[in-house]
Amino acid sequence: MGNDPSGTLDQEDPRGPDVDVSTSLQEYPGYTERMDPRPDHGEDSYSGTGRLTGRKAFITGGDSGIGRAVALAFAREGADVAIGYLPEEEEDGASCLELIRAEGRIALAVPGDLRDQSYAEAAVRRVLDHLGGLDILVNNAGFHIAQPNGLPDIDADQLRRTFETNVYGTIWLTQAALPHLSDGASIINTTSVQGYHPSTSLMDYAATKAALNNLTFSLAGILGERGIRVNAVAPGPIWTPLQPATTSSEKLESFGEGTPLGRMGQPAELAGAYVFLASNDARYVSGEILGVTGGKPLA
């Protein structure tokens, strides 16, 4: 699995994997092993070529979905990886750590809640102590709840949780990590196509992703002189535990069909974008939002 010279996903089907979406809902935050079909994180398809050898990475939301696919790809590219996740996601967190260790890399669990400002400092200290440094920060964790009626259904608790997780948590963690990042380091934020084409049922979530787009541009502008690159990946509809945990059965039945490619994506199909942005292949790339959207433009 680790020696295919492509360093990417296997290319047997250029259209990508078929997805038959389950409409069985879960309680938040959702769990990988309880999904049917189970998401593809690249377990049997992603092959690395050593593009991140010796690097130390911290990925929030790394237990499942996009974060797990990125953690696995980073490990297969030679990086040691720490993953952050909510304490109630320990089941998924433990299985992701097994994937990282199977590649012969150091794997570290850093459970906690991004809404707690004290988590940021404690998490970064733990990463530094156990990995011996930090070169790549992936601000990937996110929260959303779909509200069919839009604005009238967004209560204070939902609004607060969405912004505190997606925006506050990203800012706090980046602040905590910055003193320990040096020339050549990379920060990668997970934004969304929703930051460009907001759905009325996800308007609070979409607003946070637009904020993260702007944060990415601002950070790239101020950190470039330190040799720190800041970019983002904007996914389209991706099959992760967040979907059955936060979306109605009716929405899941057509999830992703509105993209030009006519389907949702798998987490594994995002991994290469993060590897590119974290690697020396992107050493002259900063302030970029890389869309992996099934064909929907970021405009």
Image (cartoon, rainbow, N blue to C red):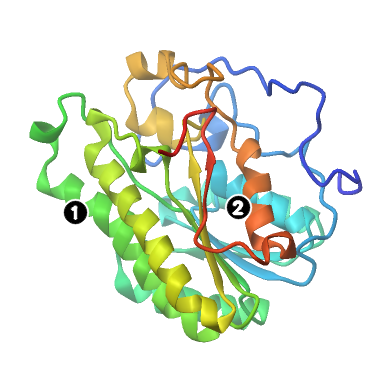
Q: Nearer the viewer, residue 236 or 81?
A: 236
Q: Residue at x 23, y 43 (%)?
A: 204
Label 2 is placed on what type of residue? Ala
Q: Point out residue 183 in the picture as x, y percentages from the top left corner.
A: 63, 81
Q: Residue at x 33, y 76 (%)?
A: 118
Q: Name the mark nearer the viewer: 1 or 2.
A: 1
Label 1: how many residues lie within 10 Å, few (<14), some (14-19) or many (20+)? some
SS of the residue under disc 2: helix
Q: Point out residue 47 in the picture as x, y percentages from the top left corner.
A: 82, 45
Q: Is residue 20 above or below residue 123?
A: above
Label 1 is placed on what type of residue? Arg
Q: Is residue 120 above or below residue 292?
A: below
Q: Quadrant of residue 97?
A: bottom right
Q: Nearer the viewer, residue 35 or 13?
A: 13
Query: Mark 1 or mark 2, which has the lower sequence index?
Result: 2
Q: Is residue 250 above or below residue 41?
A: above
Question: Do we see residue 268 in this rendering?
Answer: yes
Q: Which residue is mark 1?
A: 160
Quadrant that contains the C terminus:
top left
Q: Residue at x 39, y 49 (%)?
A: 142
Q: Point out residue 96 in the picture as x, y percentages from the top left corner.
A: 63, 50
Q: Residue furthest bottom?
A: 179
Quadrant that contains the N terminus:
top right
Spatial distance from mark 1 to mark 2, Cα to Cα?
A: 29 Å
Q: Which residue is mark 2?
A: 94
Question: Do we see residue 98 in this rendering?
Answer: no
